[in-house]
Image (tube, rainbow, N blue to C red):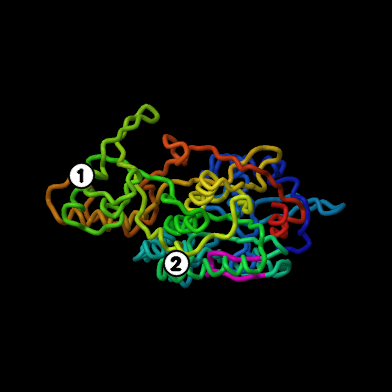
Amino acid sequence: QDPSNTGCEVTYINGYPALEAITDYANKYIRRSRDPGVRFNMVLTSLRLKNGTFDIYEGDFAYNTLLPDAESITYDLKCSNTIKKVIRYWMIAHNEGIYKEFKDFYSFTDSKSYYDSICLNAKTPSDTFKQAKYDDTLRLPSGYLNLENNEITITGELIGNVSDFATFIKFNETGVVVVPSFLPKNFMSDVNGFLTQLTAQFDLFNKSGVKKVVFDFINNEGGFALLSQYFNDLIFPQNRVAFPRDMKINNVTTFLLKQADKLNLQLFNFSPRSKLSYDTGESFDNSDAFIGNNSFTRGGVTTKYSSLYSEIFDITFFANWKFPWTNKDIIILTNGACGSACAQTTQYLSEQAKIATVSVGGLYNSNMSYSSFPGGNVVSIDDLFKDVNIIINTTTDYPKIPKNLNIAMYSFGLSLSEAYSISFPNLVTEFIYRPANYRLYYDDKSIYDPSLLWLQA
């Protein structure tokens, strides 16, 4: 990182106009959003506030998982009255959460040595896959991509933090709650303690004189759907604090659901009685009620789906505490890269609580989504097959399912369910275009100091 490049304009990338090169890359390779403005934001490196300090959020252009076409990339920079070329060579980076058991990660020289030293040594990819979600700090060679020479000071009053989930900052009567992720480290280990701490911070916010609240979900890629539901319940309590979901029904899922119900197996993915009927608000009596009799034709294909459901959780937790601000006092700020559980919260609060949204960045003078890939819920393949193996090992009469699948080499997630809008019940949230109510754009000051966006919002 060369401080002399700070503030320079990138005019060309590999001989192509910079804006054209970035936009083309975003449209070709980014799959996490259907909105070209959001894809543009996802490509760019930006800043994120986490645990009370700013760190670098790596964009998909500079930090990507695609093999580059060449060993270097050339930037033409315009710095004041001078023009210069900067050549950056690609460097292998890794996530400490995934590869921390490999002491000499950079030792491989080709695909075979990588396979031998990394893949074959990954005895518990499930655990390392999950660790990646908790430790998203990118490990790069010393001196490469850091903020040491450009420290950013938050000018507001720091009220407090809730774990690594939220930072509370006050600017006179405006309060900002920065939520970089819905995947805090200590949530699942102590849900009650976590939620108690969260309400206490909002109490402090209120008592400090905060009249208006900005929720900053910039670069929040989601996390626990359960935390999203609790957050929704905290801000806007009602009987249903999440979008209804369903899952595909075929001979395999029918068998798994019925067998788990018959044997009263308490499995998260296939226990019908552990789900709430979205129609009645009560838990399902049996697998038949959960499976239902619903068929939809989409894209010319007719498929069966389960009854609409949501997860069972304690909606009385906040019964004795009232959120002190109204929807008119709150605004949601994102750069569109707010996905999964984050999207489920922002879309719910926008649709149901009528809280206004602001999207920042993207392509100039165009509408832009405030969220991406709301989905339903995603499970890792190994967690899914833990449930599958438990069920099929109880009988010899089961449909064609890979039994005791060796998943040691496969750590990836898949969508088990999809969510529907409450206001538009026939529409899957994944395919609803939801542009923000208002637009903001980065400038040469706010790109270095995101706190300026909070007051603009």
**Amino acid on which disc 2 is placed:** Phe
Q: Which residue is mark 1?
A: 400
Q: Please give left or right for residue 405 compared with residue 69 in the image.
A: left
Quick one: 457 or 239, which is closer to the camera? 239
* Residue 285: image location, x then y, percent: 23, 49
**Amino acid on which disc 1 is placed:** Lys
Residue found farthest to the top = 300
* Residue 413: image location, x then y, percent: 39, 52
Residues marked 1 and 2 touching at CB (< 8 Å): no
**Would residue 66 be seen by someone viewing this image from the given angle?**
no
Specify start and end residues of the magenta stretch as a single range. Answer: 158-169
The vertical placement of 288 against 380, above or below, is above
The vertical placement of 46 against 419, above or below, is below
Is residue 96 part of the magenta span, yes or no? no
Disc ID at residue 187: 2
Question: Quick one: SS at disc 1?
Answer: loop
Q: CA distance from mark 1 to mark 2?
A: 37 Å
Task: Residue 92: name its quadrant.
Answer: bottom right
Quick one: 168 or 279, which is closer to the camera? 279
